[in-house]
Image (cartoon, rainbow, N blue to C red):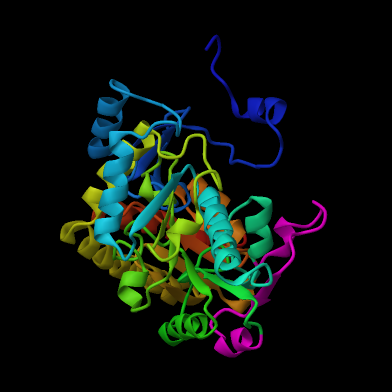
Amino acid sequence: MSQTPTRADFDHYMVPNYAPQKAVPVRGEGSRLWDQAGREYIDFAGGIAVNGLGHCHPVLVEALTTQANTLWHLSNVFTNEPAMALARSLVERTFADKVYLCSSGGEANEAALKLARRWAHDHHGEHKHRIVSFSQSFHGRTFFTVSVGGQPKYSQGFGPVPGGIVHGQYNDLDSVRNLIDDDTCAVMVEPMQGEGGIIPGKPEFLKGLRDLCDAFDALLIFDEVQTGAGRTGSLYAYQQLGVTPDILTSAKSLGGGFPVGAMLTTDRVAPAMAIGTHGSTYGGNPLASAVALAAVEFIDTPAVLEGVKHRHDLFREHLEAINRRHGVFKEIRGMGLLIGAEMASAYEGRAKDILPLALEEGLMALIAGPNVLRMAPSLVIPDADIDEGMARLERAVARLVAGQ
């Protein structure tokens, strides 16, 4: 690099589909980051629930560097040892019999939807193609996944959307009963809506979806891109909800920051994805697979998963204390370390106003829509970083209340 890039270079050289903050992080360790000016931040955003073990975790660094010195990429003309080891590990730890590896959550969801339609086509015929999803859901940014997602703003302006997609109301089983029929091939649902506002699925709702899918011979797809890989306190959220899907998608924390995605399914469904029906250039590459395997093996332990539950309680205690003093939140909700604080009516739509104030105080956070402050930190964030991050958040909240 002949010169150090600045934030202005983003506006000059890059397509303007993002609006990044002014700070440019250059180094991370654990749950802390440093920008170009050497300023330190505590990270409650986690790369949007991606950095499940924080920044530069030694277990992941070792896996990546070891693999980088042996084999990077082959193509799907060959398989490789890390990919097979990752697939085996996921099968042994879940309901699944088979795994498809790809490079992102959007790719995993695209594959899941195509598999569901192909399975229904092969077993029932072309008529069985309808997909039921939910308002305010989010499943990725491919054209198929934004159409299945329940936020029209992401699909508007790109031409006609794929047909056969309908949307019910999340946590409202009657709305699904009015939509599902013999032409339905799948119901796709997040066990907890992420971008839609950090809204946990009610157990009776999710169990009801399972029953409806069984009654109409439709497949139940759990999008666990955001809730999976330890985020909720179990390896996957379905394991603590008592509902088993036919297809599950995973990404984000699965790679701990390295791009990787996976679709998990059963021997009943997997044969529909026969040779040549789908593919991913980088899916299952040795680098991503080695890092993801290390992440899964480290996360799926009592120490980490029980620690997630402890950290959830600590986050909630701090948020409730902040709210007692400042009255900015209507509700605090979530599972594990995917936590949302909905703004009180006096601060309706102002969650986004907290983010720049928090950044000035040295804290990185997120929103889930305009009205929910979202936190998705490392699963192993130290208690001391939670305490200090919450002190910084309270300073930001106090400034919001004071009108600064």
Residue 390, position as x, y percentages in the image: 38, 59
**Residue in view at x 64 percent, y 29 percent:** 10
Where's the C terminus, which quadrant?
Answer: bottom right
**Residue in view at x 59 percent, y 72 percent:** 124
**Residue in view at x 30 percent, y 45 percent:** 86
Residue 380, position as x, y percentages in the image: 26, 52
Quadrant for residue 267, please give it.
bottom left
The answer to whether 276 appears left or right of 268 in the picture is right
The answer to whether residue 206 is visible is: yes
> 135 or 333, which is in the foreground?
135
Residue 162, position as x, y percentages in the image: 73, 60
Q: Tell me if residue 72 comes above or below residue 341 in the rendering.
A: above
| Magenta stretch, residue numbers | 150-178
The answer to whether 184 appears left or right of 4 in the picture is right
Residue 5, position as x, y percentages in the image: 57, 21
Q: Tell me if residue 187 comes above or below residue 177 in the rendering.
A: above
